[in-house]
Image (tube, rainbow, N blue to C red):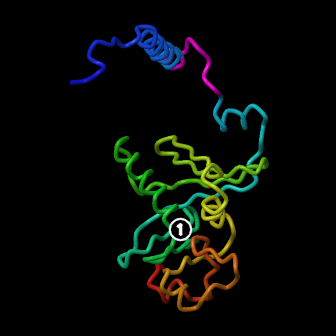
Amino acid sequence: MSHFQDEKFPPGVLWGAGGIVGITLVIVFGVRLGVLPARETAPQIRAEQQVAAVKTRSFVFADRKDGALIASDAQTKEVALVLEPGSNSGFIRGVMRGLMRERMLHEVPRDGAVTVTQWSDGALTLKDPSTGRIIELGSFGGTNRAAFAQLLVPGTHVVESILKTAERGPASPSDNTSVGRPARPGEVLAAGGPA
């Protein structure tokens, strides 16, 4: 037998919890319906402050038969990034998987370009024009931001597999395999990349 059998739950606590839930619902639906002002988003703040784009490039991402992920410049068709199979490149792959899932939900073609933009205030964004989705890449930390920032640097960058990196050893104490190194001449074609 429980010793708490004759005790009643304090009604004040129930009323308090119900009040908190009620206030939360009023705020959420108030913002959704436009009765209460929503917090401005980063793109709205940049537009308001007239922050200029420093550099913008559009890329098309595609899987290669061996499992590598290739990012090609949407205009020139030149390969900008190769993420080899087994590379420490989970952030880029995860972001692109999320964008592809969203494109499926919106029923838009999956092979459209995405745009990476560096802003004068230091922000870096990824925009999917087919769905209107904008991702603030700086929110995910410096290393993940750098993974996309390398796309704005001319040349082809290759993120090697973890096995290759382990064989050659780190180039420096701060070596990070999620940020690619520029490809050596002919390396992308030798690895089976698109011509």
- Residue 75 percent across, percent down from the top left: 57, 62
Looking at the rendering, the stretch of residues picked out in magenta corresponds to 31-39
Q: Is residue 37 magenta?
A: yes
Q: Quadrant of residue 173?
A: bottom right
In the figure, 87 relative to 59: above or below?
below
- Residue 97 percent across, percent down from the top left: 42, 56
Element class at badge 1: strand
Please name the residue shown 33% across and 13% down the image. 7
Please name the residue shown 53% across and 16% down the image. 27
Q: Quadrant of residue 73?
A: bottom right
In the figure, 186 relative to 31: above or below?
below
* Residue bearing the label numbered 1: 72
Q: Main secondary structure of the magenta part?
A: loop
**Is 5 on the left or on the right of 110, as rendered?**
left
- Residue 148 percent across, percent down from the top left: 61, 61
Q: Residues within 10 Å of mark 1 (few under 14, many from 20)?
A: many
Q: Residue furthest left?
A: 1
**Is 82 on the left or on the right of 43, as rendered?**
left
In the figure, 60 relative to 98: above or below?
below
**What amino acid is labelled 1 in the image?**
Ser
Which of 163/155 is in front? 163
Please name the residue shown 61% across and 71% down the image. 179
Which of 113/1 is in front? 1
Q: How many marks?
A: 1
Quarter that holds the N terminus: top left
Q: Is residue 125 magenta?
A: no
- Residue 69 percent across, percent down from the top left: 45, 70
Which of 19/136 is in front? 19
